[in-house]
Image (cartoon, coloured by chain):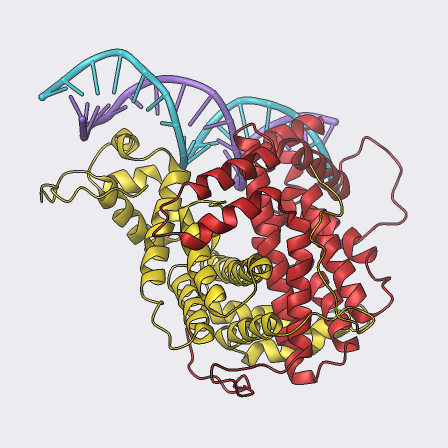
Chain colours: A red, B yellow, C purple, D cyan
Amino acid sequence: MIKKTRSRQRREESLSRDRIIAASIEILDNSGESGLTFRALSERLATGAGAIYWHIENKSDLLTAACDAIVARTMASCVIGATPPATLRALALGMFDAIDAHPWVGSALTHAAGQLPLVRIVECIGQQVRALGVPDNAQWAAVSTLLHFILGVGGQNAANTQFALTRGIDRSDFLEEMSTAWSRLDAHDYPFVRIVAGQLRIHDDRVDFLAGIDLILGGIGSPQVADDGNIKRVPKRLPRTRT
Amino acid sequence: MIKKTRSRQRREESLSRDRIIAASIEILDNSGESGLTFRALSERLATGAGAIYWHIENKSDLLTAACDAIVARTMASCVIGATPPATLRALALGMFDAIDAHPWVGSALTHAAGQLPLVRIVECIGQQVRALGVPDNAQWAAVSTLLHFILGVGGQNAANTQFALTRGIDRSDFLEEMSTAWSRLDAHDYPFVRIVAGQLRIHDDRVDFLAGIDLILGGIGSPQVADDGNIKRVPKRLPRTRT
DNA sequence: ACCTGAACACCGTTCAAGT
DNA sequence: ACCTGAACACCGTTCAAGT
């Protein structure tokens, strides 16, 4: 999918898919998702808006490609843990930090269903889950749980920073506001949220994230317990088919 | 936030926030996210585009409100499990099915940072986690992990159905395509993804989802194990502060 | 107080025309 | 083969004007 022409001329001025993606990443980092428009992009690249369409399919393609560039980097730098659980933690933290640095990646991943960036992450997680010694028929459940948790956190973090950026305030200021809003909720209807609101003010997302990863890793290592306290097996056969 | 005027006149024709939200939900269900425009909405409501702005703040507000209507229903119908784990499963499955029926809810939740729909879910999960007997200082980690996993799955499911809808194909056809695409990947670079591609074809998202929930519930019930096999405690203090 | 609808600024995408 | 840039269809939002 990503084909690099090694023998490419080093003309700094010529347009190319890679240059377009690099410029897109800069814009996305500086101005957020709403900042990336074909007009802004073509201006930065000193070209016409239509020229970009010669190299990329459409905006969705562009976003996925930019996202993939970040994910590829992140995956490459994360395969150096001592043990499988350590590597999985490093991998997860790597994605967390990547989305923290590039919030738009969080939402891009949510819109890149089954595309290359997801495949990269699945592959990396999968290899470690195998190395962990998880039996074949339980591997996908483990991988998919880790993946979706990472994507869930990433999506929320992306939304938080994006929302804060839109309102022109700092991300931590936004979380502060959210915390006070939560603590003002009706005590009868939202007892738990009120309690947790105070903790939110002093918490670190990163620590919570790692705790979640460890929770899941712990679950992967333990047998699953059903309501009645008995060991439970997840049914292999489909209990019902949806359309 | 949602204030209902009990003594509201039963004039079927008059515009109101509730009617706008109901119409929005219909449009979103029928035509997907891209179908909801102020023009389509005002046409269905037989009014001017600007009239809608008298009742709602903007499109983001509208989307969150529509999402909240679905979430509120779902939470209300899910608090009837026998035991805390059973209730948590029912709650999670309820959200899964709600997003399955209304894919746009999945992405709306990702864009409703700290808003009412999220609060509802957090409260419901939180109460059950408390009932589960999880110690105070570990409750948020458990709740946040369950929440983000649910949001992660929801976001991906939403993206899958949305993507399939855009290309005019069935959701299962899309998963089929994805599976074959994955199985054609380079065997050296993507060994795990290739293996798992075959399983993807015959799997049921719903079963995988439940397996993930059970994995997390299992982790909540077990002590966490670090790389070296020792019991690990998640640090309470922030190891580093991010901006 | 509530609604109308034309107008505004902006967007992704296309395409005839250039080199 | 690659680029230009005007044009198109469409969007969310505003606002003077109506009732």
Say which residue appears at 84% left-offset and 70% top-offset: A83
Q: Nearer the viewer, residue B46 or A123?
A: A123
Which quadrant holds residue A149?
bottom right
- The answer to whether residue A229 is seen in the rendering is yes
For the N terminus of chain A, the quadrant is bottom right
Which quadrant of the figure contains the C terminus of chain A? Answer: bottom left
- Relative to A11, residue D16 above or below: above
Q: Is residue B101 above or below residue D6?
A: below
Question: Looking at the picture, how far across and down is residue B133, in whole percent?
Answer: 51, 69
Does the rendering let one see residue A60?
Answer: no
Whole-percent x, y for residue B60 in the image: 42, 39
Q: Position of residue A201 (x, y in %)?
A: 57, 42
Camera-side residue of D15 and A234? A234
Q: Residue at image x 54%, y 83%?
A: A234
**Is D17 left or right of A67, judged from the image as shown?**
left
Residue at x 73% of width, y 55% of height: A93
Say which of B214 and A44 sits in front.
B214
Query: Looking at the rendering, which quadrant does residue A22 occupy?
Result: top right
Question: Which of A199/A54 is in front?
Answer: A199
Side of A123 where B214 appears, left or right: left
